[in-house]
């Protein structure tokens, strides 16, 4: 514990300025990625195609994000992502039946944690 | 008061996801030798899960600032696509507008996309409070993780699945409600194609761009389906009110 504290203090003293610089650069760039569409279209009448994309793109984005979150699952080596797939199927089925977001998220996560500990 | 309770209830799944992802981030920062104050500050001003986790390795490697900027841009470039759907909704929010843009994470974006506020809830206040609550969950998780996370992190492995579960729930809801199957199928197809073409780490932006292009090409068809559903809803409303 003492060691950890010394390490932290040393890293802090040695690179305090550069840590702050990295954090600020990340903050500015991250904000920029969120702000660019608003900077481009923020004050004008939206072109029809942008309005349309605002409606049609979200379902595509969501499903891509689900697959992206599963990307680190190793499907080619044992246990072939069985735990992830089982937990996902469980979430889909229970949500299709019960339509309760909290129940689906909590029970799906508990199931996945349980599967990991087996 | 009404909106506060409502926002707390709606954002509850994000509470689970963010507190635990925040803990994971805080543990990473502390075990890499950085003070909890840095973890907390970064979660306040950056507020991006995958971006901050990337930042830990960039910090450790002593990466030059320009490379930090470029890599952060690419890992967060998906946000470019989210804004397209939020412009009209956010720009009418007055002093809250800049904060709404700043706090547009994957999770906040998808909650706001999928939820329909009930009557009696002020839309602007509710949107803002949901965004603010999500942000505080993330800061809270980072604080817990960076200060005390090593004590219990091992017992909680797998809890990060709550983010995946949340997005699955949103997809199931949209599958049920959205009048056209084309957007979801486009998303699945482009994700799978680029997963195999470019590998898991490079798939995201190409898949999002491909979906955008395909949806623009299929615009007439999708808009026809959206409009057909609107007409149906309008007709049922009229029939109901005639009875």
Image (cartoon, rainbow, N blue to C red):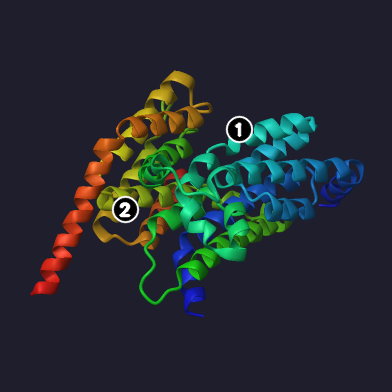
Q: CA distance from mark 2 to mark 1?
A: 29 Å
Q: Callout 1 environment at 10 Å: few (<14), some (14 to 19), or many (20+)?
A: some
Please name the residue shown 44% across and 19% down the image: B197
Q: Judge by depth and name the residue closer to the eye, B124 or B182.
A: B124
Badge count: 2
Please name the residue shown 51% across and 80% down the image: B1
Q: Callout 2 environment at 10 Å: few (<14), some (14 to 19), or many (20+)?
A: some
Question: Please, what secondary structure does the residue beneath circle 1 have?
Answer: helix
* Mark closer to the observer (2, 1): 1
Indicate the chain on which mark 1 is placed: B
Please name the residue shown 50% across and 64% down the image: B127
Indicate which disc residue B173 carries.
2
Indicate which disc residue B242 carries.
none
Residue A71 in picture, x, y percent from top left: 47, 33
Q: Is residue B44 above or below residue B12?
A: above
Question: Please, what secondary structure does the residue beneath circle 2 have?
Answer: helix
Residue B128 visible in the displayed image:
yes
A9 left or right, relative to A39: right
Q: Judge by depth and name the residue closer to the eye, B98 or A64.
A: B98
Residue A63 in picture, x, y percent from top left: 38, 41
Indicate the chain on which mark 2 is placed: B
Give the residue at mark 1. B74
């Amino acid at each position: 514990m003492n060691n950890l504290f010394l390490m932290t203090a040393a890293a802090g003293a040695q690179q305090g300025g550069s840590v702050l610089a990295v954090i600020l650069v990340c903050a500015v760039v991250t904000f920029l990625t969120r702000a660019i569409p608003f900077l481009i279209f923020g004050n004008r009448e939206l072109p029809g195609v942008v309005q349309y994309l605002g409606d049609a793109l979200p379902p595509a984005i969501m499903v891509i994000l689900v697959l992206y979150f599963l990307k680190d699952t190793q499907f080619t080596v044992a246990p072939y992502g069985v735990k992830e797939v089982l937990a996902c199927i469980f979430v889909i089925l229970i949500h299709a039946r019960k339509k309760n977001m909290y129940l689906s998220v909590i029970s799906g996560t508990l199931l996945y944690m349980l599967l990991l500990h087996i | 008061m009404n909106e506060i309770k409502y926002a707390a209830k709606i954002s509850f799944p994000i509470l689970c996801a963010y507190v635990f992802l925040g803990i994971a981030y805080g543990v990473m920062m502390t075990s890499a030798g950085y003070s909890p104050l840095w973890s907390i500050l970064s979660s306040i001003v950056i507020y991006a899960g995958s971006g901050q986790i990337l930042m830990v390795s960039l910090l450790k490697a002593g990466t030059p600032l320009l490379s930090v900027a470029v890599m952060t841009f690419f890992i967060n470039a998906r946000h470019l696509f989210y804004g397209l759907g939020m412009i009209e909704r956010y720009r009418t929010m007055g002093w809250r507008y800049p904060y709404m843009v700043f706090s547009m994470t994957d999770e906040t974006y998808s909650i706001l996309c999928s939820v329909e506020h009930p009557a009696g809830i002020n839309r602007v206040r509710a949107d803002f409070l949901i965004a603010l609550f999500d942000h505080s969950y993330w800061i809270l998780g980072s604080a817990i993780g960076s200060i005390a996370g090593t004590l219990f992190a091992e017992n909680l492995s797998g809890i990060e699945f709550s983010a995946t579960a949340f997005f699955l729930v949103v997809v199931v809801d949209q599958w049920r409600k959205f009048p056209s199957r084309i957007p979801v199928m486009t998303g699945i197809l482009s994700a799978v194609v680029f997963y195999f073409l470019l590998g898991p780490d490079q798939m995201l932006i190409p898949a999002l761009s491909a979906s955008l292009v395909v949806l623009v090409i299929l615009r007439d068809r999708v808009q026809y389906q959206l409009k057909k559903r609107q007409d149906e809803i309008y007709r049922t409303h009229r029939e109901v009110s005639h009875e």
